[in-house]
Image: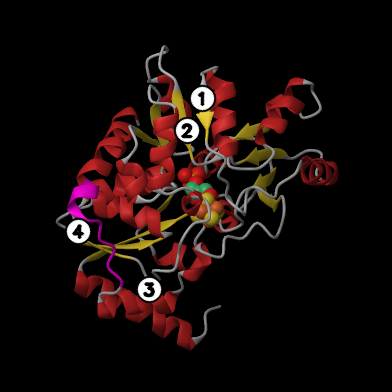
Amino acid sequence: MKSILQQEQLEKIKYWKKKRQALIIAHNYQIPGIQDIADFVGDSLELSQKAAQAKEKLLIFCGVHFMAESAAIFSPNKTVLIPDLNAGCSLAASIDAEELRKWKKRYPKAVVVSYVNTTAEVKAESDYCCTSTNAIRVVQSIPKDREIIFTPDLFLGDYVARMTGRKMYVYPGECHVHARVRPKDIFAKLGQYPGAEFLIHPECGCVTECMHYVAVKELPEEKTHILSTGGMMRHAKTSKARQFVIATETGILHRLKKENPKKEFIPLREDMVCEYMKMITLDKLLNSLVNLEFEVKVPKEIAQKARIPIERMLAIG
Ligand code: 13P
Ligand code: SF4
């Protein structure tokens, strides 16, 4: 049950959203209240597709800064607002354009594939972008004789290199939320829930170890799935399993439970919480709508260059 104050706040957000003719989009890790009021909730790929197609002139991006930047890159004629400018990303912060230029000098023949969790400046230095949904497809689309620099996620990069068999120079960046997952967490939780399926995000620190445990049959192949947050949503809906252990940021549990009320979702670790995603609150969303704060702008020259790798990614799908 919502309190009268919460109801009033939601009414105000709806009023201002209509008045501003805004589109509110939210990532799967946002707090439940934000997910419930958003027009669209999705993973990084779905959000960039939605932002690129939106008819609305005002986008309120409830997610982290690099995601809002991608929307701004695609929509130079739209206003993109983020409710809190401090909503960053430890993974995106692990590489800057200067560092990437050094890697490009070191491997001058390599094609650069950057995860979307990067700044606009890093994207502007890249040949392709990818998300956790399409990283394998993007790498497979690159001619086989080309070497690849993959930035900035070490675990996703290693996973993609193993899945595609490609020669890849993987940058050693990581997300502090996913990096802490260890195999002992997995074995302990699956011991507690032996009938559960196990859904793990490829940013997790032990994802390649998981592949090894599947290969040696210490983890059941048919019950272990390496998926993006959007992939987890789709899998949970269609799977016949009743219980799922979820190895990603815990914000996704709200949507999983809401859309699958008869199934049970168990977080692998309760402390997989991204404090940046949680900076976006209903108060700050209302402030964005009322005061048109805080605009995310990308300098024209950077945006022009950064659009190319994102467009290549969206064409691959
Ligand atoms: P997804 O693309 O799977 O939603 O992942 C985004 C992210 O930030 C993971 O930490
Ligand atoms: Fe970045 Fe990790 Fe937060 Fe995702 S969970 S937004 S990768 S810090």
**How much space separates mark 1 and mark 2, taking CA atoms?**
7 Å
Q: Is residue 295 magenta?
A: yes
Query: Does any portion of residue 255 appear in the rendered image?
Result: no
Q: How far, Cα to Cα, is label 3 from label 1? A: 40 Å
Predominant SS along the magenta part: loop
Label 2 Cα neighbours within 10 Å, binned few <14 / some 14-19 / many ≥20: many
Tell me whether the residue at label 1 lies in contact with that at label 2, contact meaning CB atoms closer than 8 angstroms: yes
Q: Which residue is mark 2?
A: 150
Q: Which residue is mark 4?
A: 56
- Say the numbered circle drawn on residue 124: none
Q: Secondary structure at mark 2?
A: strand
Tag 3 residue: 285
CB of mark 3 within 8 Å of CB of mark 2? no
Tell me which amino acid carries mark 4.
Glu
Check disc 1: other Cα within 10 Å, few if <14, some if 14-19, many if 20+.
Answer: many
Residue 100: give x, y in percent of width and height. 42, 40
- Which of discs 3 and 2 lies nearer the camera? The answer is 2
Left or right placement of residue 243 versus residue 236 in this view: right
Q: Report the residue marked by disc 1.
A: 168
- Nearer the observer: mark 1 or 4; the answer is 1
Residue visible at 39% across and 54% down?
A: 66
> Which region shows up in magenta?
294-303
